[in-house]
Amino acid sequence: MSTFDRAALVEALETLDTADAHQALAAAKRATSLLRDAGLGWNDVLQAEIRPRAMGAGPFGYRREQRELSPHEQFFMVLLSPRTPSEIKRQLRGWEARVLDGEITPQEGQELGSLYRSYVA
């Protein structure tokens, strides 16, 4: 078990916003690997309560922007939300590669948007 490197995790998570699906997938795998190597899971890192940083902030304290979130942004916000039930998270794990490669069906995209509105927004 290695020491947890929070800065490296933050760097990996910030890379998820890239338009390059392969780079985003690599960042997601790196983030998970950093946790696993430290003997941690996502539940160990995320607090039960996440407070916005500023008035008018969006989910997880991010700026609320005037644009639609991409499917991979919605995917990871739903996956990382403490409000998302475990069974939904298990279902989403099977979608990860297809979401990051932009290969989800329109119906799955709608379902993902619905999950985002239910558990994050």
Image: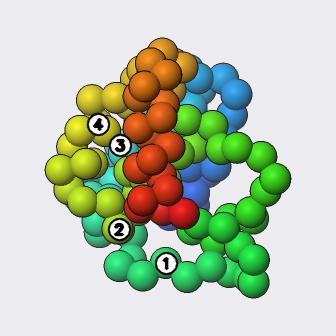
Which one is in front in this view, the residue at disc 2 or the one at disc 3? Answer: 2
The residue labelled by disc 4 is 93
Identify the disc placed on residue 88: none
Closest to the observer: 79 or 26? 79
Disc with the residue nearer the chain's start (3 vs 1) = 3
**Circle 2 Cα neighbour tier, 10 Å, few/some/many (<14 / 14–19 / ≥20):** some
In the structure shown, which secondary structural element does the residue marked by tag 4 occupy?
helix
Q: Can you see residue 12?
A: no
Identify the disc placed on residue 50: 1
Counting from the top left corner in percent of width and height, residue 92 is at 31, 39
Q: Amino acid at mark 3?
A: Ser
| Cα–Cα gap, marks 2 and 3 | 20 Å
| Cα–Cα gap, marks 3 and 1 | 23 Å
Residue at position x 34%, y 54% in the image: 35
Disc with the residue nearer the chain's start (2 vs 1) = 1
Q: Contact (CB < 8 A) between labels 4 and 3?
A: no
Q: Amino acid at mark 1?
A: Ile
Residue at position x 44%, y 18% in the image: 105
Residue at position x 54%, y 36% in the image: 72
Counting from the top left corner in percent of width and height, residue 30 is at 45, 39
Q: Contact (CB < 8 A) between labels 2 and 1?
A: yes
| Cα–Cα gap, marks 4 and 1 | 22 Å
Disc with the residue nearer the chain's start (2 vs 3) = 3
Q: Amino acid at mark 4?
A: Arg
In the structure shown, which secondary structural element does the residue marked by tag 3 occupy?
helix
Q: Can you see residue 7?
A: yes
The residue labelled by disc 3 is 33
Quadrant holding the N terminus:
bottom left
Q: Contact (CB < 8 A) between labels 3 and 1?
A: no
